[in-house]
């Protein structure tokens, strides 16, 4: 889970780029998020920063793209050919 993209926790695939930028909000964001008045502004700023970084990664050919995955990704045990997946679903 990362808070670095939108300010709200979301699930991403743990790539070297995600490891580099980190998944936790900064200490100052954590402090400011405790204030009811400032919280919405901090989230809007974090969202803007995260969206610009995501847009930059998506528009440039780079391995640093952040790949978003749903929580069910943790239940993936193997990468199977489509033929095997269809066979499992139809049997």
Image (spheres, grey):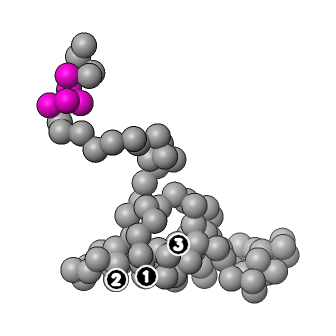
Q: Residues under labels 1 and 2: Cα distance? A: 6 Å
Q: Earlier in the sequence, mark 2 or mark 3?
A: 3
Identify which residue is drawn at 26% across, 22% down: 88
Q: Which residue lies under the disc numbered 2?
A: 56
Pair 1/3: label in front: 3
Residue 80 is left or right of residue 6, and the answer is left
Q: Which mark is residue 84?
A: none
Q: Which residues are magenta?
A: 83-87
Residue 25 is left or right of residue 57, and the answer is right
Identify which residue is drawn at 41% across, 76% down: 16
Q: Nearer the viewer, residue 1 or 28?
A: 1
Q: CB atoms at circles 1 and 3 under 8 Å apart?
A: no
Identify which residue is drawn at 42% across, 78% down: 17
Mark 1 nearby-residue class (10 Å; few <14, some 14–19, many ≥20): few
Give the quarter of the image for residue 34. Answer: bottom right
11 vs 65: above or below: above
Q: Which residue lies under the disc numbered 1?
A: 52
Q: CB atoms at circles 1 and 2 under 8 Å apart?
A: yes
Q: Which mark is residue 5?
A: 3
- The residue at the far top in this view is 91
Give the quarter of the image for residue 13. Answer: bottom left
Q: State the SS at label 1.
A: helix
Secondary structure character of the magenta stretch overall: helix
On the question of residue 30 being in view, the answer is: yes
- The residue at the far right in this view is 35
- In which quadrant is the C terminus drawn? top left
Q: State the SS at label 3.
A: loop
Mark 2 nearby-residue class (10 Å; few <14, some 14–19, many ≥20): some
Identify which residue is drawn at 57% across, 61% down: 1
**Residue 57 in the image, given as x and y percentages of width and height:** 33, 79
**Residue 10 in the image, given as x and y percentages of width and height:** 55, 59
Q: Residues under labels 2 and 3: Cα distance? A: 13 Å
């Amino acid at each position: 889970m990362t808070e670095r993209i939108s300010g709200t926790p979301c699930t991403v695939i743990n790539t070297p780029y995600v490891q580099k930028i980190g998944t936790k909000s900064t200490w100052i964001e954590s402090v400011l998020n405790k204030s009811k008045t400032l919280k919405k502004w901090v989230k809007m700023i974090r969202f803007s920063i995260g969206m610009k970084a995501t847009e930059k990664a998506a528009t440039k050919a780079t391995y640093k793209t952040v790949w978003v995955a749903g929580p069910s990704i943790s239940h993936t045990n193997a990468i199977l050919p489509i033929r095997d997946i269809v066979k499992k679903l139809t049997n």
